[in-house]
């Protein structure tokens, strides 16, 4: 522990710099000292300590404790002031300690204030800025084909690093080739459809405009018009999880083709069998492009026992060819491709049902379609 | 959202709602004491006895948390200006790092609660706040609290097959709304991969291995086609003594169906009551009562607030013909013009709604507004 208000402990030197430490309206040999501390391994996990104080017990109420020792994010003076940071105040071994509930935010300045009798002490800290990182970039937008059905349902945007949410729809757009924005093309969901790592965003085109017979479809029509060229753009202004802009703007140009109201038909897929004793890929050729994410997840290779065969999947030729390369050599026994019928094409038609289903007169008694099917093959 | 809060307040004033609300039972009896490990906090809703249902999309779990906040005197109104700045200050961060995910009023105490994300990236911290009677914000500590949890049914299994070397499962279901009625938590979700609706009923108190039940909800469009479209937001309403769900779909129809139809694996087709119009995205909805009449209040991103009289809901015929020229079909509605920028909505009292509004220059404001 230090012996005066200007001193900093060893851990302090390795951790955060104390920018200001003032003791006012107090005199005496053993002046109380207020200082910031931080965990050596994590400079953002910081707390405030006061030693050599004459406080015997903590005020019983929340307000009294906040009046005694509080931490505020430094900001322009406000009347009334913004609330202090949430945290826990304690007295342990004669040290008064305030542990903020949350870690410090990179680059922000915080002021701790202790008020006891005539004593007012303040200590400031500036959390170190984030270490510079390579800015995130868009690595891929799927579907990959250059021609997409005019009733296209979704795009997936893949990023090289975790992103931040809250305003993505302000940074993506659909434009015609003259640069004119297509009005309201997306289903803007406050939740934003990210994967858990926040490296992939799903963007749905407004289903109300896609689905025939609904008001938006009737009044403004489908989002896309057959035969026209479009540019789907992700602006550089979209921020990654560390708050940095994207490395560069990304755009995908495509043409709107005819609408697709047909369901994927696994029976018509072609399987190119691999040879046993090799790691050659099993190649499945669809009759049209399928949803990239769902084809990666809902098609699995299994042995006769039903056990999945581990391996890597890739989609090729405009998402019309699915390739599976096993981690181990193929064995010459019966296998099958397990096809989950939730698999969709680019227009949301699944194997189970089309995106727009003809109205069943007895909807609640209709038998459920099979949830999956098997396409057999044997490496030879 | 927040069905019970509506239901209780509504029941208190109009006795329109029926059904056993299990108010006498100690619903927190089977809960354990500890720290609910929320990875995210999305929609929230209150049940009886101060029990909060918090949807955690990231861990595909619904948490029931006994807040212990079971009584209190509610101030007539409530206003918190610069809400995002104040939340940021309390959480020690910048306002740009704050997202208010939902708002719900605890009917037992009248206290508004806010579900907040601190941070915008994958490491964002889920935070629960309450608004004290003086308008100050307080963090609700979840370190040692009575809670139970229900994992959502059919969570996607981690496939052994992944793209490239990274074999993480990228599927995530975002919970779009949650509510409690008739001893059941109702959860609406939307996947980031397949386009399908899932509406789940999870009996509460949660059983040890409660899997809940998933049903498919369709709406028919104009008597020709139907779509298994996801539900965006919903509320409950009683028609002829039977609780119904009023659900706004992602593709704009407003649909009703009896909650009793939500049975495991069922395929339910709702009656389309109205189309909420073009370029219109329903964000939140509540049911309230005024005198002998009741109304549905829908917050939309484009049309502002829509007030729909529910009189004659039972008689509304499903939309089965082409809509000529109009903006909506089926039920008629009024636009509440002076409620601007409403992002979150709940019923505050018999006379007031509570909203989170975004001003063009003022950031977020929490305010109570007289029910129209």
Image (cartoon, coloured by chain):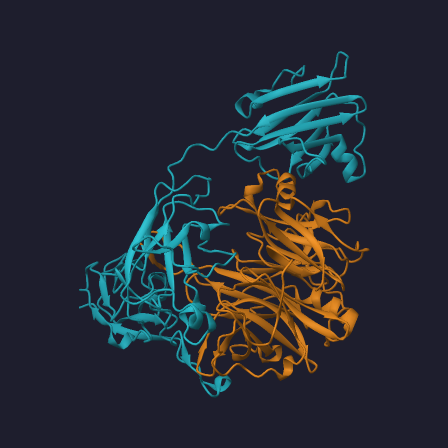
Quadrant of the image containing the N terminus of chain A: top right
Q: Residue at x 59, y 21 (%)?
A: A19
Q: Colour of chain B?
A: orange
Q: Is residue B170 visible?
A: no
Q: Quadrant of residue A380?
A: bottom left
Q: Residue at x 49, y 50 (%)?
A: A167
Q: Residue at x 38, y 68 (%)?
A: A222
* Residue B257 left/right relative to A155: right
Q: Quadrant of residue B206?
A: bottom right
* Residue B275 left/right relative to B80: left
Work out whether residue A133 or residue B149 is closer to the camera in this orientation and state it: A133
Work out whether residue B248 or residue A40 is closer to the camera in this orientation and state it: B248
Count of marks overlaid on the render? 0
The answer to whether B323 is drawn above or below residue B104 in the figure is below
Chain shaded cyan:
A
Return the x and y of residue B24 as percentages of the image width and height: 78, 69
Return the x and y of residue A256 as percentages of the image width and height: 29, 64
The answer to whether B240 is drawn above or below residue A147 in the figure is below
Q: Is residue A27 visible?
A: yes
* Residue A294 left/right relative to A97: left
Return the x and y of residue A280 as percentages of the image width and height: 20, 60
Return the x and y of residue A134 as percentages of the image width and height: 37, 37
* Residue at far top of view: A29
* Residue at far front of view: B325
The answer to whether B72 is drawn above or below residue B327 in the figure is above
């Amino acid at each position: 522990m230090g012996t005066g208000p200007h001193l900093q402990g060893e851990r302090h030197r390795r951790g955060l710099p104390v920018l200001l430490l003032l003791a006012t309206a107090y005199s005496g040999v053993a002046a109380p000292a207020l200082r910031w501390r931080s965990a050596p391994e994590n400079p953002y996990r910081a707390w405030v300590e006061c030693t050599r104080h004459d406080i015997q017990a903590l005020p019983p109420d929340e307000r009294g404790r906040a009046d005694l020792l509080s931490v505020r994010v430094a900001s322009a003076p406000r009347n009334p002031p913004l609330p202090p940071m949430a945290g826990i105040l304690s007295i342990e071994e004669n040290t008064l300690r305030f542990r903020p509930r949350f870690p410090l935010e990179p680059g922000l300045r915080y002021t701790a204030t202790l008020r006891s009798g005539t004593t007012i002490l303040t200590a400031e800290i500036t959390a170190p800025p984030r270490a510079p990182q390579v800015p995130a970039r868009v690595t891929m937008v799927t579907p990959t084909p250059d021609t997409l059905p005019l009733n296209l349902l979704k795009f997936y945007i893949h990023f090289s690093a975790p992103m931040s949410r809250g305003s993505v729809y302000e940074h993506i757009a659909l434009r015609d080739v003259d640069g004119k924005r297509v009005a309201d093309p997306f289903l803007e969901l406050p939740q934003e459809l990210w994967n858990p790592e926040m490296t992939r965003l799903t963007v749905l085109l407004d289903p109300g405009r896609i689905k025939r017979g609904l008001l938006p479809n009737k009044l403004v029509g489908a989002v896309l018009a057959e035969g026209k060229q479009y540019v789907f753009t992700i602006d550089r202004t979209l921020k990654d999880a560390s708050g940095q802009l994207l490395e560069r703007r990304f755009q995908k140009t495509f043409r709107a083709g005819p609408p697709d109201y047909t369901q994927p038909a696994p029976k018509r897929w072609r399987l190119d069998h691999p040879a046993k004793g090799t790691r050659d890929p099993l190649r499945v050729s669809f009759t049209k492009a399928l949803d990239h994410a769902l084809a990666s997840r809902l098609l699995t290779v299994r042995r006769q026992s039903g056990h999945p065969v581990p391996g890597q999947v890739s989609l090729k030729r405009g998402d019309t060819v699915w390739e599976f390369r096993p981690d181990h050599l193929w064995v010459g026994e019966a296998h099958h491709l397990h096809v989950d019928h939730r698999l969709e094409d680019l227009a949301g038609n699944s194997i189970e049902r089309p995106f727009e289903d003809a109205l069943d007169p007895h909807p609640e008694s209709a038998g459920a379609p099979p949830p999956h099917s098997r396409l057999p093959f044997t490496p030879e | 959202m927040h069905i019970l809060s509506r239901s209780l307040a509504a029941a208190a004033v109009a006795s329109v709602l029926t059904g056993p609300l299990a108010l006498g039972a100690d619903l927190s009896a089977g809960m354990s004491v500890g720290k609910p490990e929320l990875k995210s906090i999305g929609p929230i809703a209150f049940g009886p006895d101060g029990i909060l249902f918090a949807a955690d999309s990231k861990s595909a779990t619904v948490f029931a948390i006994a807040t212990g906040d079971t009584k209190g005197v509610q101030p007539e109104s409530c206003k918190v200006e610069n809400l995002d700045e104040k939340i940021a200050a309390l959480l020690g961060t910048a306002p740009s790092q704050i997202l208010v995910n939902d708002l719900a009023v605890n009917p037992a105490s009248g206290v508004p609660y806010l579900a907040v994300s601190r941070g915008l990236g994958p490491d964002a911290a889920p935070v629960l706040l309450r608004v004290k009677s003086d308008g100050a914000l307080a963090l609700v500590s979840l370190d040692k609290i009575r809670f139970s949890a229900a994992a959502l049914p059919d969570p996607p299994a981690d496939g052994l097959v992944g793209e490239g070397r990274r074999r993480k499962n990228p599927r995530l279901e975002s919970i779009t709304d949650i509510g409690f009625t008739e001893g059941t938590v109702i959860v609406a979700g939307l996947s980031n991969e397949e386009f399908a609706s899932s509406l789940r009923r999870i009996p509460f108190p949660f059983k040890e291995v409660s899997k809940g039940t998933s049903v498919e909800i369709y709406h028919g469009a104009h008597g020709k086609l139907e779509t298994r479209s996801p539900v965006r937001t919903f509320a409950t309403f009683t028609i002829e003594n039977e609780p119904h769900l009023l659900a706004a779909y992602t593709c704009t129809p407003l649909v009703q169906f009896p909650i009793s139809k939500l049975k495991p694996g069922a395929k339910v087709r709702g009656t389309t009551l109205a189309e909420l119009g073009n370029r219109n995205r329903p964000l939140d909805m509540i049911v309230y009562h005024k005198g002998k009449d009741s109304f549905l209040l829908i917050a939309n991103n484009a049309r502002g607030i829509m007030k729909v009289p529910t009189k004659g809901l039972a008689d509304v015929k499903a939309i089965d013909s082409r809509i000529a020229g109009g903006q909506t079909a089926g039920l008629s509605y009024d636009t509440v013009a002076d409620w601007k920028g409403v992002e979150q909505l709940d019923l505050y009292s018999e006379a007031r709604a509570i909203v989170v509004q975004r001003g063009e220059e003022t950031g977020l404001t929490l305010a109570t507004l007289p029910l129209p």
